[in-house]
Amino acid sequence: MMPDLGKYAFAVLASYGATVVLLAALVALSFWQRARAKRLLDEVEARAGKTDG
Amino acid sequence: MSIWEYANPKKFMQTSAWLLPWAVGLTVLCLGIGLIWGFFFTPDDYKQGATVKIIYIHVPAAMMAINVWVMMLVTSLIWIVRRHHVSALAAKAAAPIGLTFTLIALVTGAFWGQPMWGTWWAWDPRLTSFLVLCLFYLGYIALWQAVENPDTAADLTGVLCVVGSVFAMLSRYAVNFWNQGLHQGASLSMDAKENVSDVFWLPLLICIAGFVLLFIALVLMRTRTEIRTRRAQALMARERLA
């Protein structure tokens, strides 16, 4: 199944590996920031709700 | 209905909540098909051997590195001219994605260049303009972090974005302006003679679509995060005043 990359195996696999690592880091950062923003907004809105009434 | 309705944060949140799952699904589909087809089912190039498989990530990432900056330019100009907060936040949300695509283009280019040119790096016009674009992305992100007032930050980063657009365009056309570098010409062109071979072209096109969709999914998600953060900050400021 795995294609024969011959003497270029390192260049090809390292390129794909680096891409996966960079994209995974970006996606993980985006999810982490989203969770943090949601939590913060929920807390602040809950406090604002209590204050208003 | 006017396009400016989407500049309303509430409308944007509603529309993006509907669009996001579609964008994620289509991203997974396109990247899955394009990368599996390209990696496993395309032949080696007669000159470049198996390294041609790097084209399926290098070219889409490089294209998107420039196109993300163009998107940031458009949204920054909308902010500067019409003062729509969502457009400024969309530009802010896009910058880390553009930086990641630029890094992918630089790193995969180095891995590809080493066996083909015998060097990881050369001060070639296209490579150098991409490095400068990468520095502009870093500067843009740093400027957003450094300025406390969000409107001032949006103004300053908007101006930086306009200046950086010169380098984004240089990155795109460097091989046409100066043809003494190591980097080859465009892989995709309106001129069929310049295009990559048909056997690589279709999976490459699907990978490009996948990278575009990945950008759309991430920018929607990150803009929603920025809108939530801005709303939380506004409510906290109101709390402090009360």
Image (cartoon, coloured by chain):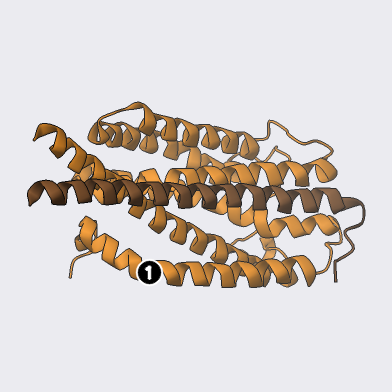
Q: Position of residue B213 (x, y in %)?
A: 49, 64
Number of labels in the image equals 1
Quadrant the N terminus of chain B occupies: bottom left
Indicate whether B27 appears above or below B132.
below
Q: Amino acid at mark 1?
A: Leu
Residue at 48 percent across and 43 percent down: it is B96
Query: Would you say residue B119 is visible in this rendering?
Result: yes
Query: Which residue is tagged 1?
Result: B19
- In the figure, residue B161 lies in which quadrant? top left
Q: Residues within 10 Å of mark 1 (few under 14, many from 20)?
A: some
Residue at 30 percent across and 32 percent down: it is B153
- In the figure, residue B50 lies in which quadrant? bottom right
In front of the other: B237 or B203? B237
Would residue B215 appear left or right of B193 to someone viewing this image?
A: left
Would residue B195 appear left or right of A51 to someone viewing this image?
A: right
Indicate whether A50 appears above or below B161.
below
Would residue B216 appear left or right of B117 to someone viewing this image?
A: left
Q: Position of residue B217 (x, y in %)?
A: 45, 61
Q: Position of residue B197 (x, y in %)?
A: 73, 67
Residue at 83 percent across and 68 percent down: it is B43
Quadrant the C terminus of chain B occupies: top left
Chain assigned brown: A
Q: Which hue is chain B drawn in? A: orange
In front of the other: B61 or B238? B238
Indicate whether B26 appears above or below B57.
below
Query: Would you say residue B173 is visible in this rendering?
Result: no
